[in-house]
Amino acid sequence: MASRLSDPIGFELFKNTLLSIADEMALTILRTAYSGVLKDNMDYSTAFCDAEGRTVAQGLTLPAHLSSFPDALAATIRRYDDRMRPGDVYALNDPFEGGMHLPDVFILKPIFHAGRRVAFAATICHQTDMGGRVAGSNASDSTEIFQEGLRIPPVKMYDAGEPNETLFRLLEKNVRLPVRVFGDMRAQLAACHIAEEAFLRLIAKHGIEQVSAYMQEILDYTERLTRAALAELPDGEWSFTDWIDDDGIEFGKPIPLTVTLAKHGDRMTADWTGTSPQVKGAINNTLSFTRAATYTCIKSVLPHEILCNAGFYRPIEVIAPPGTIANAVPPAACAARGLTGFRMVDTVFGALAQMLPERVIAASEGGNTGVSIGGYHADRTPFIFVEFICSAWGGRPWADGLDGNANLFANMSLPSAEVTETEQPLEVLCCELIPDVGGPGKHRGGMSIRRAYRLREDEAVLQVRADRHTFRPYGLYGGSPGKPSRNRLISDGATRELTAKVTMTPMRRGDVFIHDQPGPGGWGDPLERDPLRVLRDVQNELVSPASARDDYGVVLDTSTLAVDEAATTRRRRELRAARGWAAPPFVSR
């Protein structure tokens, strides 16, 4: 048997083959899923894990699902372990027994060779509906998990190849769209079967001893790379606090998220002590989701060739006291916990920006907004529209934030208007960049998206998971914060402003819901931005002439849209004198 040292090329080929299996699983789901939230939004992840449930390769999918597979597999192995046999498939979604929130359903398949469990193929998909009081099972105003939908502890979905008819019948009677849910679950099953076949071919080629040794070496190699990269970072401790506006129950009550990063040698600790106790609303995190947010931020400042697997997790400790919003305990509601995860990313980046100011971006748009519109057609068959609006990045130390792009924590796609209008009783009236929404800076925040929907059915119920109405995305090192989010409902010609978190809001035929994503923060002093870049933004209708003058100190000749250099010099001198900075502030909110 060749070792890593005697056959480094063989090891590299094996490593990339395993990564390709995880990616092929992801492509299988993309091509065979039924629901828009999977095939268009791409809210799912895949992984290939060893016999102990340790992630060895994760598909190129969602960073938000980092660390989800180890917890799901640990819960499943605790319950079944030596009772697993070939042909078994397991499913779960219970946040308090390996899951994250109820719409995220794990389907896990143990892989056997010569009667011994040697690996797992693992998938997680956001299902369109898992029952509960609100269509889409994603309401932010539930106050306990029992209101949110069907809880599935680790159970056998298939027993030695035979389907668990009881489980399928329970699902059929508890979800609003069983055809779509079962179709998406079959996509997950197909991905697991493809991974099994590919892995067994690897075993046939290399032998089980060599394959097992290579899988162990992938984890050890990743750990060595991670430790070496951490060792090059400065030692010390850095703390940062950001806030969620409220939990959708106690409106106007801010929720603090606090993290302290401690880096010593080749190890790092992220301690969430000081973060809010768990809340009444459905935005509470599982520990796995808090870990995912933490890992995502740390991974983003380390070399890109470090893999996302269990070896990367080893030198990084995440502490979150039980009973907090970062590590909720039953019966906490957590359907809309995505909002908290996104804010945690902003929080960790705020700490990392003190440690590595040249590598860390300003706050992004606050995470994607979840929009669900559900109801019944005239024949009483249900419809459920679930979409996550992706937007823009914060200003970067070396460049502007990306416009109209998925949040770094999500890596999701925005469904096309044509597909939505074909599959749902909705019209998408606009999908456009919002001028002036990004925080001004030497490198401005990206421009976020406005999206509007008109209902074409008699009635429906609207729910929205959003934030950053009150606490705007922060700017860094002199950059300004972005603009707040905004929700509006137009009914019978009258426009009504809505709160950030909306649930059980009725819509009637012809009503229009409009959502403005918040703007990301800027990075660096906006008065240091090249006037020609400001001019280009004005010409592209991303920045208004008024903002150019008031935020950037750039005066334009409105007749020719050219920079008035003398007036710009005077204007910038006036703005510098008015603000009176001795030095640019680290953070601007």
Image (cartoon, helix red, strand yellow):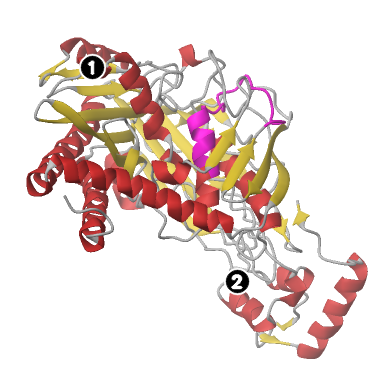
Which residue has dot 1 on it? 82
Q: Give the quadrant of residue 575.
A: bottom right
Q: Badge 1: few (under 14), some or many (20 or more) residues near its Cα, within 10 Å?
A: few
Instruction: Verify CB contact (< 8 Å) between mark 1 and mark 2.
Output: no
Is 232 covered by the magenta stretch?
no
Which residue has dot 2 on it? 398
Which residue is at 15% across, 38% downward?
196
Question: Tag 2 or tag 1, which sits nearer the N-term?
Answer: 1
Which residue is at 64% across, 22% downward?
279
- What element does badge 1 sit on? helix
Give the CA distance from mark 1 to mark 2: 53 Å
Residue 205 position in % (x across, y down): 8, 49
Q: Is residue 281 toward the left or the right of residue 415 in the image?
A: right
Residue 528 position in % (x across, y down): 74, 76
Residue 275 position in % (x across, y down): 69, 31
Which residue is at 52% across, 58% downward?
229
Number of callouts in the render?
2
The secondary structure that dominates the magenta segment is: loop
- What element does badge 2 sit on? loop
Q: Give the range drawn in magenta.
A: 273-294
Is 287 covered by the magenta stretch?
yes
Between 7 and 333, the one nearer to me in the picture: 7
